[in-house]
Image: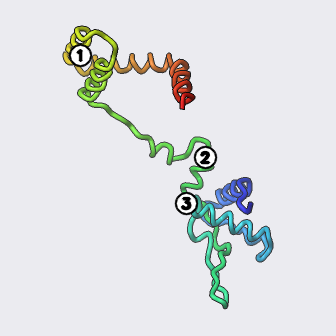
C-alpha cells in the first residue's frame, strides 16, 4: 500500500520543526523516484485530512494534459500540530462540549423512569409527587448521586449490555 502511517508521522514531525514555514522535502526525495511518489501520495492524503496546508502539493500539468501532483511547499497546519500533541492541542480544549440539563428536563427523565419501573402505582405516584416538589439544588444532588451509583455499577451494566448484544 502506498499510504504509510510511519512516513506520515515522520513527515508531520519534520514539518512541525519549521512551522509556520514550509519543510523542504525536495532535498530528501529526488523527483521521479518511487520514494518521491510515495511522499507525494502521503502528503496528498494528509492534505485531504486537513493536517497540512493545501499549498503543500501542486498539480503539474503535462503536455498531454494529465495532472500529476508534486511536492510544493509542505506546511503543517493547526490540525496537524494538534494531531501530534499528546493532549490533542487546542482542538481538544476548544472542542469540549458542555451539556446542561434544565431542572424540568431532569424531573421528566426521572419521572419517566419511575413510571417504567415495577413499583406499585401508589409508590410511583408518591415518588413522582415528591420529585415534583424538589427544588433545583436537590434535583442536582439527586442526579449526582444517581450518576455515582451508575458508575459504581458499571461492570454489571457492561455485562448486561454484553448479554443483550449476544442475544442477537
x and y percent of residue 72 in the render? Answer: 65, 74
* Foreground label between 2 and 3: 3
Q: Residue at x 48, y 20 (%)?
A: 151
Measured Cα–Cα span from mark 2 to mark 3: 16 Å
Quadrant into which the N terminus falls: bottom right
Mark 1 vs mark 2, foreground winner is 1
Q: CA distance from mark 3 to mark 1?
A: 51 Å
Q: Are marks 2 and 3 in contact (CB under 8 Å)?
A: no
Q: Which residue is mark 3?
A: 50
Element under label 2?
A: loop
Whichever of labels 1 and 2 marks the residue nearer the N terminus, that label is: 2
Q: Please, which residue is most extreme toward the bottom here?
A: 63
Res 45 quadrant in image: bottom right
Q: Which residue is mark 1?
A: 128
Q: Which residue is mark 2?
A: 85
Query: Residue at (69%, 57%) from the top-left corner?
Result: 8
Q: Earlier in the sequence, mark 3 or mark 1?
A: 3
Q: Is residue 156 above or below residue 87?
A: above
**Residue at figure coordinates x 61%, y 64% from the top left:** 75
The mark that comes first in sequence, 2 or 3, is 3
> Does 162 appear above or below 74?
above
Amino acid at each position: 500500500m502506498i499510504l504509510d502511517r510511519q512516513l506520515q508521522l515522520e513527515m508531520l514531525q519534520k514539518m512541525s520543526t519549521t512551522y509556520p514555514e514550509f519543510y523542504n522535502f525536495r532535498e530528501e526525495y529526488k523527483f521521479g523516484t518511487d520514494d518521491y511518489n510515495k511522499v507525494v501520495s502521503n502528503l496528498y492524503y494528509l492534505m485531504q485530512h486537513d493536517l497540512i496546508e493545501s499549498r503543500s502539493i501542486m498539480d503539474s500539468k503535462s503536455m498531454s494534459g494529465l495532472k500529476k501532483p508534486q511536492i510544493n511547499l509542505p506546511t503543517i497546519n493547526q490540525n496537524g500540530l494538534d494531531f501530534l500533541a499528546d493532549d490533542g492541542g487546542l482542538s481538544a480544549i476548544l472542542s469540549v462540549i458542555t451539556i446542561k440539563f434544565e431542572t424540568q428536563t431532569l424531573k421528566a427523565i426521572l419521572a419517566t423512569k419511575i413510571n417504567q419501573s415495577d413499583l406499585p402505582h401508589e409508590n410511583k405516584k408518591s415518588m413522582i409527587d415528591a420529585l415534583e416538589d424538589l427544588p433545583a439544588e436537590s434535583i442536582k444532588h439527586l442526579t449526582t448521586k444517581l450518576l455515582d451509583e451508575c458508575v459504581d455499577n458499571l461492570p454489571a451494566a457492561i455485562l448486561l449490555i454484553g448479554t443483550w448484544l449476544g442475544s442477537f
